[in-house]
């Protein structure tokens, strides 16, 4: 039986779009015996409700089908000028794991990496899953990931540092998820479990053969 990886897409993307943008990565993972699953965020918002600073991400990431809405794992919080992870996301991922899992690891890009990192602090506890429904995750990968910045989430990171092997991938030309944001999530992991890997591009998951080979080697080393 193939080991399964949960893949969380970025803001305004979808599972199918993310799958199309990670063909090289997926091919390498499949060579190592993994099967990738791409859920689509359950929340859809009018483009006008998305903060202006995320416009570049939206323009580069069309949604599926005829929908004009923006798909997202997180919801904007106008009261605090921040965001939060809504219960719809928690419920959806809980049900998705029960239906498609259990999963060996979790991978995220941009907003999906932020959500994956938060969940990696206590995957079963935050999603309300038993050990029988989902065994402990064995690894976590964040491409252009970040630590949630709203105050209500800080205790979770501080009291539950991510201890499973984690790979944090940052693009040297990434102007959407700046280095300080990537470092925030990286520092939320225990020192002996985290690895930082740079690539020469921008805000995307690299698919070049040389790079995905490095990711595959990391996975083989920690597995």
Image (cartoon, grey):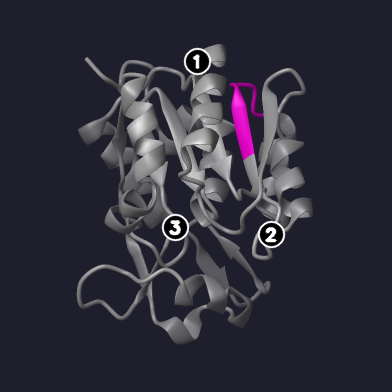
Q: Residue 106: horizontal and vertical position, in percent?
A: 45, 34
Q: Cα distance, mark 1 to mark 2?
A: 28 Å
Nearer the observer, 201 or 140? 201
Position of the N terminus by quadrant: top left
Of badges 3 and 2, nearer the viewer stands 2
Inspect this view and state whether residue 4 appears.
no
Q: SS at mark 3?
A: loop
Q: Residue 101: horizontal and vertical position, in percent?
A: 28, 28
Q: Which comes before the other along the chain, label 1 or label 3?
A: 3
Q: Is residue 165 within the magenta segment?
A: yes
What's drawn in magenta, residue-wise? 162-168
Q: Which comes before the other along the chain, label 1 or label 2?
A: 2
Of badges 1 and 3, nearer the viewer stands 1
Q: Residue 70: horizontal and vertical position, in percent?
A: 39, 73
Mark identifier at residue 146: none
Kindly identify which residue carries mark 3.
73
Res 117 quadrant in image: top right
- What residue is rendered at 34% in x and 77% in y? 69
Q: Cα distance, mark 3 to mark 2?
A: 25 Å
Kindly identify which residue carries mark 1.
220
- What residue is rendered at 34% in x and 39% in y? 94
Q: SS at mark 1?
A: helix
């Amino acid at each position: 039986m193939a080991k399964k990886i949960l893949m969380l897409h970025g803001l305004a993307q979808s599972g199918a779009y993310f799958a199309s943008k990670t063909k090289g990565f997926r091919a390498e993972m499949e060579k190592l015996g993994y099967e990738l699953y791409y859920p689509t965020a359950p929340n859809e918002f009018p483009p006008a409700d998305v903060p202006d600073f995320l416009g570049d991400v939206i323009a580069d990431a069309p949604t599926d089908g005829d929908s004009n809405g923006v798909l997202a794992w997180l919801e904007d919080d106008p009261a605090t000028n921040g965001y939060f992870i809504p219960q719809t996301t928690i419920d959806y991922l809980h049900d998705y794991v029960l239906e498609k899992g259990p999963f060996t690891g979790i991978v995220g890009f941009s907003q999906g990496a932020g959500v994956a990192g938060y969940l990696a602090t206590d995957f079963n506890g935050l999603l309300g899953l038993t050990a029988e429904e989902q065994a402990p995750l064995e690894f976590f990968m964040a491409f252009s990931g970040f630590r949630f910045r709203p105050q209500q989430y800080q205790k979770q990171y501080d009291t539950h540092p991510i201890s499973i092997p984690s790979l944090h991938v940052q693009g040297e030309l990434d102007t959407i998820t700046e280095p300080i944001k990537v470092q925030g999530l990286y520092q939320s992991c225990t020192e002996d479990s985290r690895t930082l890997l740079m690539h020469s591009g921008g805000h995307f998951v690299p698919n070049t053969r040389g790079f995905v080979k490095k990711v595959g080697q990391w996975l083989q080393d920690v597995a």
